[in-house]
Image (spheres, rainbow, N blue to C red):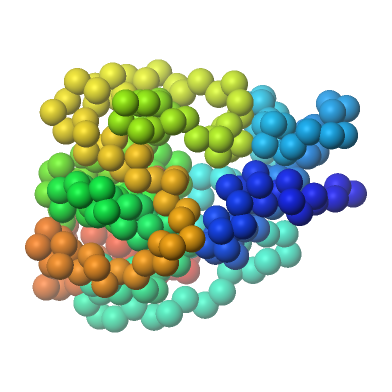
Amino acid sequence: MIKIDRRDFIASLGGAAAVALMSHEARADAIEHYLEDRLYAQAEGSATGGSAAAAFPTAAEIHAAIPTRHYRRGAGGLFVATQPGQNVDFLAEMSAKPTLLEFFEKRFMRTSNHCLQSANKAMQRGVQEEVILACLLHDTIQELMKTDHGYWGAAMYEPYVPPITSWAIRYHQALRFFPDEAAGYHYPDLYHRMYGMDYVPPPHIQAAKTFAEGHEWYHAAREVTVSDLYAFDDTAKVTIDPFMNIIERHFKQPAEGLGFDNSPSAHMWRSMGNPDAPL
Ligand SMILES: [Fe+2]
Ligand SMILES: [Fe+2]
């Protein structure tokens, strides 16, 4: 049985303030990753001494752990309970004409805190409203699908937001794997933990990064990564209120409600509204 070194674990997550702001689910995930790391370290005979932060798994070790789970890591947060023995729960019923705000309240439970903090940081940095909106929305699609979330997210938001907003959501996915020290983005330890310390992004992600670098909107997608992971700030307990004006100005809320306006992504909203539909 692996024991958790509390101090070591908290330090690996960025300190007590960062842990205090994590949701229960995020903490549970973090414990899982921590234990996996310790397991790998023990298997290699290196579990004594050293911090968990120094014991990142390899990409091959992460791959080997696939059959140890009862779910796939790319599945949307609304659709799985990731803890052993845990079941999914009832969800609040959606209204007949759901708004973005309603999705934040009733479906974006796992992603909203992170996204609100990112948007708060972007607002403090004084970036344009369309990019603050991108930060606000950038990971909410992970409730529906985690794999390739930048592309899924861009597709879902495209009918409703300015082009630069969905562009930034799409390309943040590729850019987060590539540091841009001048912009203030460093490769996060979290990705060493999630993807493996020797992970190399696949060719399509490398191509997307090259494309984005040459694009006039590069700064927008880069901003999403800069305001992203470092949003764990103990003074940043934010609500959606400061962003309501930006949503009103730049998010085209359909009169029929999200999911019922026949847009190209209406089905994605419906799927999140009713994830218990069997087919
Ligand atoms: Fe993301
Ligand atoms: Fe994020």
Q: How many marks?
A: 0
214 or 85, which is in the foreground?
A: 214
Would residue 204 be visible to someone looking at this image?
no
Residue at horizontal 45%, vertical 22%? Answer: 202
Residue at horizontal 16%, vertical 53%? Answer: 129
Picture coordinates of residue 225, whole percent (x, y) = 35, 39
Question: Image quadrant for the C terminus?
Answer: bottom left
186 or 88, which is in the foreground?
A: 186
Picture coordinates of residue 139, whole percent (x, y) = 38, 51
Residue at horizontal 32%, vertical 19%? Answer: 207
Q: Which quadrant would residue 40 be assigned to in this image?
A: top right
67 left or right of 161 in image: right
107 or 276, which is in the foreground?
A: 107
Picture coordinates of residue 91, whole percent (x, y) = 47, 76
Ligand 1 shows up in which quadrant of the image?
top left
Picture coordinates of residue 147, whole percent (x, y) = 45, 41
Q: Which quadrant would residue 16 be assigned to in this image?
A: bottom right
Note whether 4 is above or below 113 in the view shown.
above
Would residue 97 be visible to someone looking at this image?
yes
189 or 125, which is in the foreground?
A: 125
132 left or right of 48 in image: left
212 left or right of 59 in image: left
105 left or right of 276 in image: left
Note whether 237 is above or below 75 in the view shown.
below
Residue at horizontal 67%, vertical 37%? Answer: 53
